[in-house]
């Protein structure tokens, strides 16, 4: 699945805001930075756990899989999380 740049930005913003509401910005940045080299494997794990995740969330994981397959997208998410952390 290929994401449009607008949809990618929307997913990044939604995920970053959700992590901000849960006060998980710092742990998320640490996790993403340490797992950036294996982000593709993580995206494949999302596919594996998709049946379980569907029970927990109405959202489709396909778009998040596409988001985490690209290291550049992970880097943009980290940058957005850092911006939100600086706003505090």
Image (spheres, rainbow, N blue to C red):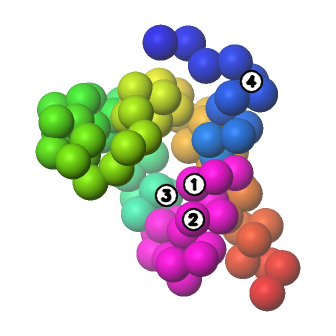
Find disc 3 in the rendering and name its residue.
33
Q: Please state the horizontal and vertical placement of residue 57, each as a whole percent of the image.
A: 34, 50
Find disc 1 in the rendering and name its residue.
15
Q: Please indicate whether residue 75 sits to the left or right of residue 63 in the image.
A: right
Point out the stretch of residues depicted in magenta.
13-30
Secondary structure type for disc 1: helix
Q: Local crowd at mark 4 within 10 Å, few (<14), some, or many (≥20)?
A: few
Asked whether residue 69 appears in the rendered view, the answer is no
Q: Earlier in the sequence, mark 4 or mark 3?
A: 4
Residues at marks 2 and 1, CA–CA distance in whole angstroms:
5 Å
Find disc 4 in the rendering and name its residue.
5
Q: Residue at x 62, y 41 (%)?
A: 11
Q: Name the residue at the bottom extreme.
A: 88
Residue 53 lies within the magenta run: no
Which mark is in front, 2 or 4?
2
Q: Local crowd at mark 1 within 10 Å, few (<14), some, or many (≥20)?
A: some
Q: Is residue 33 above or below residue 47?
A: below
Q: Please state the horizontal and vertical placement of residue 44, each as a whole percent of the image.
A: 26, 29
């Amino acid at each position: 699945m290929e994401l449009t740049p607008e949809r990618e930005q929307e997913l990044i913003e939604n995920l970053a805001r959700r992590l901000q509401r849960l006060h998980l910005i710092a742990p998320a940045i640490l996790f993403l930075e340490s797992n950036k080299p294996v982000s593709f494997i993580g995206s494949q794990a999302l596919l594996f756990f998709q049946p379980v995740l569907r029970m927990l969330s109405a959202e489709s994981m396909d778009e998040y899989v596409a988001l985490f397959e690209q290291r550049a997208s992970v880097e943009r998410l980290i940058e957005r999380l850092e911006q939100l952390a600086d706003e505090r």
